[in-house]
C-alpha cells in the first residue's frame, strides 16, 4: 500500500532529506543538476508543506511534492527560475499573494511506482486538496510537457501573462517548461468535473483509504492529509 501524507517541512527534517535524495536521483537520471526547487533552504520554511508517497511497509519515500506558500522571506521557486527571463514574475506573485498564493513544486516519483499515476495524478490532486487548510486562494506550478494535462484537469491554466505565453526554457536550454496557475483553489471552477469530485472527496475526508486506478491496475492509497491543528498558515 502507498501512503500519501502531508507535513510542514520544519516538523520532519528526516523525511525532507529522504524527499530530496529521491528527487535528486531522478533529476540526475534526466541529466538535470541545477534546479531551483531542489534548493534545500525550504527545510527551514514554516510555510512549506511536503507531501510524500511512502511504502507503508518499508517507509521508503517513492515520490513527493511540495506546496510552498508565498512569503517575503522565501521567494517561490518559480520566481527564482524565471526572473532572469521575465522580471514581472515578482510583481505577479506579490499581487496574487494578497489573497494567499503558493506554488506546487518539486514533484517527482521513483521508477518503482512509474505508471501508477503517483507523480502525474495523485500528488497533484493531493496538493490541490489541501489548499483550504493553507489559507490560499491560488496556486502556481511550473510544468514539464507531460504534466500539463493533469494540471489542467485539476484546474490549472497556462499563465500566458508570464514569459513567452507562459513558456520558458527551463531547467535546461533544450527543455521547455510551462508556467500555470490555479486561479481559485477553493471553488475549483476551472477543474474538470470528475477531478473536482476526487479533490472534494479528499477535502471532506482527508484521512482515508481509497482504491485508485493506475495504468498498472488498481491499488490502495492511504491518505493522511489533515495538517495538525496549529500548523496552518
Image (tube, grey):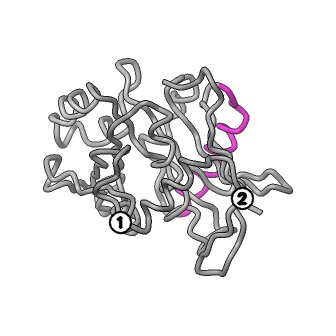
As rendered, which of 83 and 232 lies closer to the eye?
232
Q: Is residue 189 left or right of residue 113?
A: left
What mark, if any, has residue 209 been given in the picture?
A: 2
What is the x, y in percent for residue 190? 28, 57
Which percent across, then down, holds residue 119? 54, 61
SS at circle 2:
strand
Name the one closer to the observer, 14 or 121: 121
Is residue 89 found inside the magenta-colored segment of the image? no
Residue found 52% across the figure and 29% down from its top: 42
| Residue occupying image coordinates x 29% and y 61% | 176
Q: Nearer the viewer, residue 134 or 70?
A: 134
Residue 200, percent from left and from top: 49, 53
CA neighbours of label 2 inside 10 A, class few (<14), some (14 to 19), many (20+): some
Q: Is 163 placed left or right of 122 in the picture?
A: left
Dominant SS in magenta: helix
Where is residue 129? Give x, y as percent: 49, 48
Q: Residue at x 72, y 56 (%)?
A: 222
Residue at position x 62%, y 55% in the image: 63
Tell me whether circle 2 and circle 1 mark residues in contact (CB < 8 Å).
Answer: no
Determine whether the residue tagged by mark 1 lies in a helix, strand or loop: loop
- Residue tagged 1: 192
Q: Quadrant of the N terminus?
A: bottom right
Farthest residue, direction front: 204
How many numbered discs?
2
State whether residue 16 is above or below residue 219: above
Sequence-first tag of 2 and 1: 1
The stretch of residues the image draws in magenta is 11-29
Neighbor class of circle 1 (other Cα within 10 Å; few <14, some 14-19, many 20+) is some
Amino acid at each position: 500500500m502507498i501512503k500519501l501524507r502531508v507535513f510542514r517541512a520544519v516538523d520532519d527534517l528526516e523525511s525532507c532529506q529522504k524527499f530530496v535524495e529521491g528527487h535528486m536521483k531522478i533529476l540526475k537520471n534526466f541529466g538535470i543538476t541545477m534546479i531551483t526547487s531542489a534548493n534545500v533552504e525550504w527545510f527551514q520554511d514554516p510555510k512549506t508543506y511536503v507531501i510524500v508517497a511512502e511504502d507503508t511497509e518499508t517507509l521508503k519515500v517513492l515520490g513527493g511534492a511540495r506546496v510552498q506558500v508565498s512569503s517575503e522571506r522565501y521567494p517561490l521557486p518559480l520566481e527564482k527560475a524565471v526572473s532572469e527571463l521575465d522580471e514581472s514574475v515578482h510583481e505577479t506573485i506579490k499581487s496574487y499573494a494578497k489573497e494567499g498564493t503558493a506554488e506546487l513544486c518539486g514533484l517527482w516519483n521513483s521508477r518503482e511506482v512509474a505508471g501508477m499515476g503517483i507523480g502525474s495524478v495523485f500528488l497533484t490532486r493531493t496538493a490541490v486538496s489541501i489548499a483550504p487548510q493553507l489559507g490560499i486562494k491560488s496556486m502556481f506550478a511550473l510544468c514539464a510537457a507531460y504534466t500539463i494535462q493533469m494540471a489542467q484537469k485539476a484546474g490549472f491554466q497556462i499563465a500566458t501573462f508570464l514569459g513567452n505565453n507562459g513558456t520558458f526554457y527551463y531547467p535546461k536550454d533544450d527543455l521547455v517548461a510551462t508556467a500555470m496557475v490555479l486561479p481559485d483553489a477553493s471553488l475549483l471552477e476551472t477543474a474538470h468535473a470528475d477531478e473536482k469530485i476526487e479533490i472534494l472527496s479528499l477535502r471532506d475526508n482527508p484521512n482515508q483509504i481509497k482504491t485508485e486506478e493506475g495504468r498498472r491496475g488498481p491499488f490502495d492509497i492511504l491518505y493522511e492529509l489533515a495538517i495538525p491543528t496549529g500548523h496552518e498558515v
